[in-house]
Amino acid sequence: MVATGSDTLPSQLERLDDSRIGRALIAVVRVGVAFLWIQNLGWKVPPRFGEGSTPPEGLYQFTRYAVDYPVFTPYAWLVEHVVLPNFVAFAWLTLLLEACIGAFLLVGLAVRFWALVGAAQSLVITLSVLNAPNEWHWAYYLMILAHLGLFAVAAGRAGGLDGVLRPVWRRSTGRLARTLLTVS
Amino acid sequence: MAERLNRAALVIGAAVVVSSLLGIPGSTQFRLVRIGGGTAAVLVGFGLIAVIGARLGRRPLVATAGLGLLAAAGLQLAQLGRSTNWLGGDGSTFGLLLGFGLGLTVLSLVPLPAEPIPIGDERQ
């Protein structure tokens, strides 16, 4: 939702807070969520990502939880029959995807797109570990909600590169610039 | 507009330098990123290049810093989980280098418009 002035809002709706402190806090939340992803890249260790260890450990252990403690039967079937037999490929994909989520959120580039990717990845994690022992459900619900919040306020426009570059993209007729305008 | 891009590069360059402190020893919760000696040198070196480039308005210097950080990210990715680890980092180091490298590279490569663009923060 882009609201550039009160004339774009129905008269009964209040504009969201656009104060300096509000924008600064949005940037803090965005960077904080970025570090959530970045820090958790540290325990995803190739080449096996925990596969083959006894007992299972690392990313393999958490992926197995989807089968051992199923949350959603079709997803558990998918993990058992597609993901685990090709685990290392999926583990690399996870590592690269989560690195991109963290990197783009950190500098505030194309944040609306990456916030949605982050919400989707958080949902995947939720479906894997929600029923595992000693897990706090709200940790995963909050991850999803935080990303939806970043999407809703287009958080890259507050202290991020989206805010710096959108005026340039808006003037451009190129396809890449149009796309970046849409996803920022 | 160039001034605005330089200011953004200056902020990111300073953040790159400061981020070398993120590897402070202590509990896992507060050690956000693994910063080895090699990583700290890379962050301080390329961060200072970015700051100098932004202060002087020299975009090639900002590009050098950005591409250097991306190269370091590639090196860290290639050495993840191996006994050879020149930067002394892990996946978190890769993510940090990727983010900063991406940001500085994009800032240095974005084409400057011929006409001035009104300055003002984007609104949500």
Image (cartoon, rainbow, N blue to C red):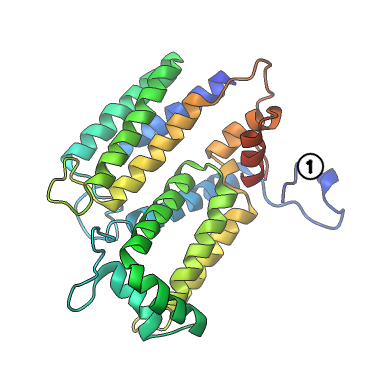
Query: Which residue is nearer to you in this view: B35 or A47?
Result: A47
Q: In this picture, is B7 found above or below B75?
A: above
Q: In which quarter of the image is residue B104?
A: top left
Q: In which quarter of the image is residue A168?
A: top right
Give, as a three-letter code, the residue at label 1: Gly
Q: Is residue B119 left or right of residue A118?
A: right
Q: Position of residue B40 (x, y in %)?
A: 23, 37
| Residue A135 visible in this rendered orientation of the protein | no
The mark tally for this picture is: 1
Question: Looking at the image, which residue is at 53% across and 25% down?
Answer: B5
Question: Looking at the image, which residue is at 31% across and 28% down?
Answer: B46
Q: In this view, does A159 lie to the left or right of A175?
A: left
Q: Is residue A148 left or right of residue B94?
A: right
Q: What residue does disc 1 label?
A: A5
Question: Looking at the image, which residue is at 20% across and 56% down?
Answer: B26
Question: Looking at the image, which residue is at 49% across and 25% down?
Answer: B109
Q: Position of residue B95 (x, y in %)?
A: 35, 47
Q: Where is residue B119 in the image (x, y as percent from the top left)?
A: 65, 26
Q: In this view, does A91 lie to the left or right of B118?
A: left
